[in-house]
Image: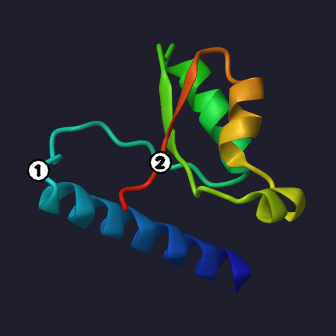
Amino acid sequence: MWQRARDAYRAEVAQDTERWALAQGLAAAPRHIRHGDPVLELADLAEARDAALVVVGSRRLGLPARFFLSSTASALAGLAACPVAVVPPRD
């Protein structure tokens, strides 16, 4: 039962990603959907695709939040074989 629920969730994620890409005019852009630890999956994908750069968003964590929460961008920058650009959100 758990595997069916996981597979249904993954299919929904793929459909939502397709709809978003179409709405953004990115229908022809390649997409890679991975499941698991974001840092490990992004680093692995970047290496597999021989990426020149990985771009990730920032949550703009303040100092107290950084104390309790991990930063995907910081962890990825330390693990990835290529440079990592961290882009802040729009205000």
Which residue is the site of mark 2? 88
Q: Do the residues labelled 2 and 1 touch (CB within 8 Å)?
A: no
Q: Which residue is found at the position 22% from the left and 55% from the top?
A: 21
Kind of residue indicated by mark 2: Pro
- Classify residue 81 by image quadrant: top right
**In the displayed structure image, the side of residue 18 where residue 32 appears, left or right:** right
At which x and y percent is residue 34? 56, 49
The residue that mark 1 highlights is 25
**Of marks 2 and 1, the one in the foreground:** 2
Label 1 Cα crowd, 10 Å radius (few <14 / some 14-19 / many 20+): few
Tell me: residue 12, above or below residue 45: below
Residue at 61% x, 82% y is 5
Q: Earlier in the sequence, mark 2 or mark 1?
A: 1
Screen quadrant of the C terminus: bottom left
Give amino acid for label 1: Gly
Secondary element at tag 1: loop
Left or right, residue 71 beside residue 89: right
The image shows residue 18, relative to residue 54, as above or below, that is below
Q: Name the disc covering residue 45, or none.
A: none
**Along the viewing direction, whichever of 5 and 70 lies nearer the viewer:** 70
Q: Which residue lies furthest to the right in this view?
A: 67
Q: Residue at x 78, y 64 (%)?
A: 65
Give coordinates of residue 23: x percent, y percent. 14, 62
User: In the image, residue 16 lies at what x, y percent?
Assistant: 33, 69
Q: Which of the pair 66/35 is nearer the observer?
A: 66
Image point (88%, 64%), residue name: 68
Q: Is residue 74 left or right of residue 31?
A: right
SS at circle 2: loop
